[in-house]
Image (cartoon, grey):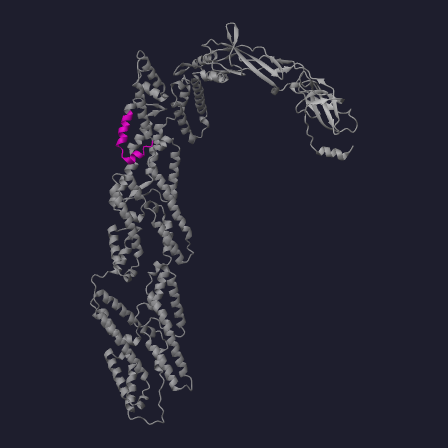
Amino acid sequence: MNKKLFFTLGAVPIVMIAPTIAYGEEIQTVSLTGDKIVNATLKATIENLPAKSIVKGYQWYYAESVVGENSSGSTYKPIIGATTAALKVPVEAAGRSIFVEATTTEGIKYKSESVKINELQLEITAPRLNDYAVPGETIKASGASVTDAMGAKLESGQITYSYQWFYKVGESFTIIDGATNSTYTIAKDALDKDVQHLIVRVKAKVGSAVIESDISNTLTISNESVDSMIAEIQEIFVNDYKYNFTSLSSFKADVTSLESKYQALSAAAKENITNYSALKRALADVETIEKLYEKVNKVDEIEEKDKAKYIQDIEEAYNKLDLLQRSLDPQEALYTDIKNLLDNRTNEEFKEVRKINEAIQALLVYEASYVKYNAADVMSLQAMIDTLDKDIAALSQNAQAAVRNQAILQDAKQDIKKVQQFIKSFDKLSLKDTPNKQVTTAKSIRTAYEKLTYRQAQLVTDEWMALLWHAESAEEQQIAQLNSEIADYVGNLGSRYLINPSSTSWQSHVNNVDRLVAEYKGLTKNSTTQIIGYSQLVTLQKDLKTALKVIQSIDAYQKLSETKGVASNKLQSTYTSALKAYNKLTSLQQSLVYNADEFLKNAPTASVDPGKQEPTDKAAADKLVSDIDKLANIKNYTFATFEDAVNSASTIYKNLSSSARKYVTNYSILTAASKDLSGAKSFHKKVQAAREETDVKKQSKKIESVQKAYDKLPANQQYLAKQQYEDLLANRLVDKNAPNLAQLNNDIAAIIVNDMYIISVEKINELSTQYNKLSAADKKTVTNYPILKAAVSDAKKATTFIAQYEKSFASNPSTVIKAFSKLTTKQASLVSPAIRQAIITKEKELQSSEVVVTLIESIDGLLIKGEYIANLETKVKELRTIYDSLNASDKKTIKNYKKLTEAESDLKKVADVHALYVPANGDEQKRKAWKTAYSKLSKRLELLYKQTHPSDV
């Protein structure tokens, strides 16, 4: 084989064109295999072709001459699209001869012999119709099946069906014009036109073969199935208000069977079942009754806590049934079962309710116009509440609604939480902490305690309060010790400090003073107010530093004076410098200079050059030296004599010759004395300015300035100024209107006793006014101001509450009582005993209202096992009157009030139905209207109707 040629041909697509071919001399070397019937497959076989022939295409033909073709050979019609070696015999080939032609790549054509395809011998089955149909229904012909007796397997797409419908006239059938589809819709008025029977005939065509079926069976047009169904549905009713019932199971079987029949009907038939809604309702009613039975049977499976609600739901569901539905319970077996389930424990439960109400009231006790819990601590109160909660949970829901004062329980639970939170704050407190930390923590705890209400505070045991007090006073011992040690240093100061330091004790005193200052700074702010003499202690601390410098200067001089060969002028200069420093000290500071006495006695001896000639006025100089030495002991003088002595010595010194002045070796003492005199005079001017001031407040400020200046004066100047200074203080102006700060401070401290105010709001406001009028300086001295500040805040809240009391107590006492319960212990103590007592009285009244409990009980008693009591209308009117007489607060506690309104509504419903009543011999239409209304009554209302209007039924 030429492989190159083969692959080339294989790669080039062959386009087969099937024109009419005129054959001349042909070679019949192609053979055919396969069945010669429609839809069978014929195959061309080229085994007999010359060797090495390559066929490039095929064409199948009908072995029939083509009309109108003129050619030298025979002309045949190609079978369109039949260009492969295999051919599925088309329907059009039935009864015709066909052959195939194969063409090689060399253009040589090879032909098969002609074979004749079998004729189609069609067979068809008669169509089938339903036996019955109703007017308006669309019916369909089915069952007509076409086959070939010669064995051809016909395909559905090859068969074309046509139909013709006929209706019966007399004993014959006539064509129905236009009824040529497989379906036919029966006219709704067919029976009116006497069209009662239908048949159909089917014609089938396959290719050119046609066959017609026998006529179908006869379909009868009738409303009998509809009428029968309507009648059967009617039979399940005795009348509009009662089912035709023997037992629930048999009734359910009947209506279920009817439902199955209905669903089997055609859509048109279903439309004609005019009472199907009645059947549908019957099915729903059976389901409703079955569900109620199912729930009743499951009661024992329900948890006890949910059982009351479960049974109530069953009872309410049954009570919604109308007369027709209740006819499925003809012997009232279901109703009786439900009644037996209803727990009619009303009387017994309300006895328990009363006990619980009393127990809740007993949680509170009233004393001294205050209310507190009847429990020593939180644990005791919690145990009482747990018992009450358990008892309440055991009640039915209706009885639970009658439990009064449950707000007391809720408040108690909240109070327990508050107190537990407060006690939890003690976790932060440890007696091992430093006093400062204990006091700081205790302050936080105290703040939390003061926010508790009176009821809450009474649940805090003495054990906790003792622990709090101990922590609050943790600094007391430290304060006492600190005050004692400070007093040892600066208590009752005169002109000198109480200590007598030495070179060996000096540092210990310095260390002690520094320690005391540090301890003071470590105290809490409140504790520092209890320290006496701290400012003097700080002054001592400063004075020690100042005195130390002088001590060191004196020690330097003493050391120099003991050194040989030191020039006299250097020694004199050192002495003079130390002396000046000493003279600048205040008397208190000088008392700390432990080496001063020896220093003052060891003045350097001045000398004059012996080689020089003595001046004529040397004797005057010597006398002046004696006079100046006297000035060193200033306490031997008054201010006036000291002034005269200084002035005289100064004048004499000025009159000496320059040579004689050199002999005045103690001139530095005169210089220092002159300076002290000048300083005293300057201070006197300040005293005089203060003395001349006529305004009390202004003089007070000037005297304060004078006091500060006096404290800073050196010791000698303080001595010279002392007389006028003390005279100023003794004769200062007196402000008769000046505040008594000590009294104010004491008054503030006394406003609280046992964590309660013992004064009125007005007195607190008065103290606040006094404080606000003070100067900034005076305010700083009122150490108890934090107490006053808290009292002012509490007074505002108490005032707000009192205003609410006066406005709303009469109309809405519950709100006022609630507001009072939120006040802290201190705030409540500012409310007058009269108001507190009025609140307690009203609270007791609201808690113990027997009228309310009785009303709740009576409303519950309107129904006994789901049925209204006799003389319902009279009882309802009585209860309505009682309810309307209650105040708004009490009305809110009637949790079953809805039952009263439902009873009123039910009485009206029954009255409305009775208004339609017509006797049996009356107007039939009106009586039917009454029966319809009566049938819609629930079981409860039906019984109420029979009770109130027995002659109607």
Residue 721 sits in quarter = bottom left
Q: Position of residue 215 (x, y in %)?
A: 57, 10
Q: Is residue 890 magenta?
A: yes
**x, y percentage for residue 840?**
28, 41
Figure quadrant of residue 873 = top left
Residue 830 against residue 585 in the figure, above or below:
above
Q: Residue most toward the top?
A: 171
Q: Which residues are magenta?
A: 875-895
Residue at 28% across, 74% down: 718
Quadrant in which the C terminus appears: top left
What kind of secondary structure does the magenta stretch mostly adopt? helix
Given residues 814 and 264, the one toward you in this image is 264
Residues 720 and 19: in front is 19
Q: Position of residue 287 (x, y in %)?
A: 45, 21
Location of residue 625 with respect to 367 vertically, above or below: below
**How far from the left and from the top, in percent, is residue 949?**
30, 18
